[in-house]
Amino acid sequence: MTAPGAAEQAAPRRKSKVVSSVQPSVAPRKRGALDFVLERQLELSAAFLLVILAADFVAPEDAHLSTHLTPDPSLHLRSLPARFLRLSFRKPDEELYYKGRDDAFFVAWWVIAFCFLREVAMRYVFVPVARFCGIRSRHALVRFAEQGWSLAYYSCSWALGLYINQTSPYRSLNTLHFWKGYPHDALPPLTKWYFYLNQIIVINLEARRKDYYQMFTHHIITALLMMFSYVLNWTRIGNTILCTMDLVDIFLPLAKLFKYTGNHRVSDATFAVFLLSWIFTRHVVFGRIIWSVITEPQTVLEYDWRSEDGYYFSRNVQWCFAALLLSLQLLICLWLAMILRVLWNMMRGASAEDVRSDDEDDDEEVDAEGTPARGDGRESRKMR
């Protein structure tokens, strides 16, 4: 993860350059389909969402009982637009939902919806707030908007995950209840929705930082853990892992927002809270989860593989899951070393400096109209 803050006390800040609107002629770069999609993602995503909503308004909602895609009879949606907008496979007379391939439509809807929400929030909420706070450089405007979106996203994700966790039998790290009553093959609607949405964040739309590959590896491992916990019906442990991971991702962007607005003392104080929460959640609590996976399930369950019953607990599955958790813990330890390096610099009198981000104060050129760049490194006329 990052270690936020500013380095103004450690080194003089470079003055921003003002670039004239008259630039020397440069051969234009050949533009491709990806450039068009990135520049028009707001319009394209809005068009997709409106088409699905209109089709759902016209097509009548209809469902029929079937066991075609689920182990027991469940309500299958006939209408294609309804599959985008509603959860599939509800158990009759119960507010519990099975899993099945039609859930891909629901996921696709929310992927596009989050692209739309992210673009709207960055352009029309966080960039204006940044300008109100006195930020003018293109680079800092984009950084502020990115961190503002991260703060909003992870705050909502963690609050929702914590609510699910604390209203479940495994609340407060009652880890034996990860395994009691297994398999947990049918989920409440909020839990199913939460699992599908928690990983919908596209880091490739943001500018690459120095630890891009570590961050990408972190997302891959986390996504694999969530996929396995969902498919193998280990959703209780998956929810706890997400709650553990999301908390520090609230304090980190908050500290960086304070930094961008010049509140360096508050940024450093927030960084201290970030550090304490990191150690507690990602090493103490997460270590307890790893211990549970390695030592506890065999005290409650028998090793067996019965796919027709949704029962997937074997030694190979257990140790593969534990290996992913240990790999994630190793990566987290490497980041902790970087964070402690920031702490050491703070103890020597410097402000908290992000040791893994790209140079936050580089590329702070502002054109004559103050136009910021996009989060993917391309200039955005929509933020004007």
Image (tube, rainbow, N blue to C red):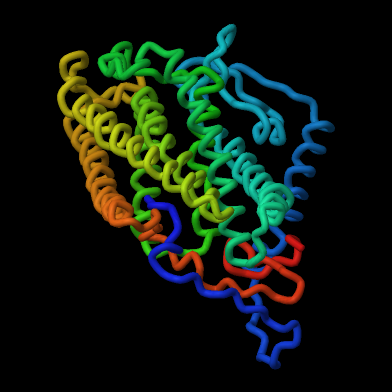
Q: Residue at x 48, y 52 (%)?
A: 264
Q: How many marks?
A: 0
- Residue 145, percent from left and from top: 61, 53
Q: Is residue 69 visible?
A: no
In the image, residue 142 sits, relative to residue 347, either above or below, namely below
In the image: residue 103, left or right of residue 44: left
In the image, residue 121 sits, relative to residue 95, either above or below, namely below
In the image: residue 58, left or right of residue 345: right
**Residue lying furthest top:** 93
Quarter of the image with the C terminus is bottom right
- Residue 291, percent from left and from top: 19, 28
Near-viewer residue (64 or 342): 342
In the image: residue 297, left or right of residue 230: left
- Residue 88, percent from left and from top: 59, 26
- Residue 127, percent from left and from top: 68, 54
**Residue lying furthest right:** 58
In the image, residue 344 sits, relative to residue 226, either above or below, namely below
Near-viewer residue (215 or 320): 215
Q: Residue at x 74, y 43 (%)?
A: 49
Q: Is residue 90 visible?
A: yes
